[in-house]
Amino acid sequence: MFNDNTIILPESLPTGLQSDFRELQEYYDAGDWLQFDLLFEAVEASAKAYYLAGKITREELNLIFRKYGIG
């Protein structure tokens, strides 16, 4: 479970992703690593799908992964 709070994700990200990030933050704040990790697997796949569909940029995808310690 990792969340770099110094990285602020753009508000222009798709609404579905923003909702997922809020839920991840709730699990992070509660220290619920199991729910956080389970949800993040789905969020990671979703973020990649948004990128492949042209809904987010490569820079935004990289920012998401840096925030959550991927890559």
Image (cartoon, grey):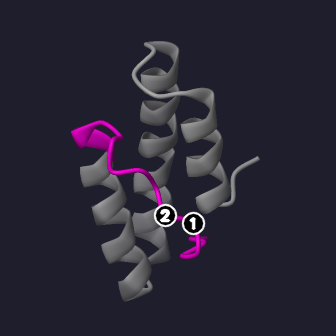
- Foreground residue, 28 or 58? 58
Label 2 and label 1: CA atoms lie apart by 4 Å
Task: Please report the residue visible at 33 percent of the width from the left and 51 percent of the height from the top.
Answer: 11
Residue displayed at 69% across by 51% down? 70
Q: Residues within 10 Å of mark 2 (few under 14, many from 20)?
A: few
Pointer 1: what residue? 7
Residue 61's x, y, as percent? Answer: 57, 37
Prevailing secondary structure of the magenta residues: loop
* Residue 20 % position (x, y): 31, 52
What stretch of residues is rendered in magenta?
1-17
Across the whole image, how many numbered discs are drawn on residues?
2
Q: Quadrant of residue 67?
A: bottom right
Residue 39 is situated, as x and y percent measured from the top left of the image, at: 40, 54
Return the mark for residue 33: none
Q: Secondary structure at mark 1?
A: loop
Q: Is residue 2 visible?
A: yes
The residue sitting at 67% across, 55% down in the picture is: 66
Q: Which residue is mark 2?
A: 8
Q: Is residue 46 magenta?
A: no
Q: Are marks 2 and 1 in contact (CB under 8 Å)?
A: yes
Quadrant for residue 4, please give it.
bottom right
Q: Secondary structure beneath disc 2? A: loop
Q: Is residue 7 magenta?
A: yes
29 sits left or right of 40 in the view: left
Amino acid type, residue under disc 2 in the picture: Ile
